Amino acid sequence: MHFEVHLPFWLEALVAFFLLLGAVFAFIGSIGLARLPDFYSRLHAPTKATTLGVGGMLIASMLHFSYAQGSLSVHEILVAIFLLISAPITAYMLSKVALHHQSPSVQNTQGQDLPQQLQQEWHRERIKSKTDKPKLPG
């Protein structure tokens, strides 16, 4: 389906602004993914900046197609909801796997001793659960 839409200048400017804003955020996230030194830093760049980039592009698309169709375009809202739900969950799962595999990180990264602390806490909980006798009612 191909149709030509003539947007008013103010709407074209607004769509162009959100497209450029989204492109800048996506570009910054891509640079961060390529240039940051360790896995944890590389994970942070795309999940934050690229999510904002896609959000800007979705706003631009929603404005354009809402005007072109004469009604509110909700497809972009559904994509944004899916992105906002799935991106943090994916980042959390990837970071937990990296933490479990003790992926190396940069020297100045905060939480360097976190894997050891988690392992010690897990070991304490395991010993505690073995020594605690379940109490019978009565």
Image (spheres, grey):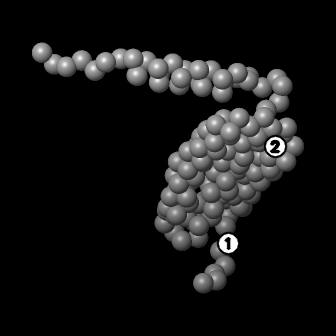
| Mark 1: few/some/many CA within 10 Å (<14, 14-19, 20+) | few
Q: Is residue 119 above or below residue 49?
A: above
Report the amino acid beneath label 2: Gly
Q: Which residue is drawn at 79% across and 32% down?
A: 105
Instruction: State the image coordinates of residue 130 (x, y, percent, origin top left).
Output: 40, 22
Q: Which residue is drawn at 83% across and 30% down?
A: 106
Q: Quarter of the image containing the C terminus? A: top left
Instruction: State the image coordinates of residue 55 (x, y, percent, origin top left).
Output: 64, 51
Mark 2 or mark 1, which has the lower sequence index? 1
Report the amino acid beneath label 1: His
Nearer to the camera, 10 or 57? 57
Instruction: State the image coordinates of residue 32 (x, y, percent, origin top left).
Output: 81, 43
Q: Quarter of the image containing the N terminus? A: bottom right
Q: In this view, does 97 lie to the left or right of 66?
A: right
Residue 68, located in which quarter of the rendered image? Answer: bottom right
Residue located farthest toward the right when viewing the structure as drawn:
35
Q: Of helix, strand and loop, which one carries label 2?
A: helix
Mark 1 lies on residue: 6
Q: Residue at x 43, y 18 (%)?
A: 128
Q: Of helix, strand and loop, which one carries label 1?
A: loop
Mark 2 lies on residue: 32
Nearer to the camera, 10 or 82? 82
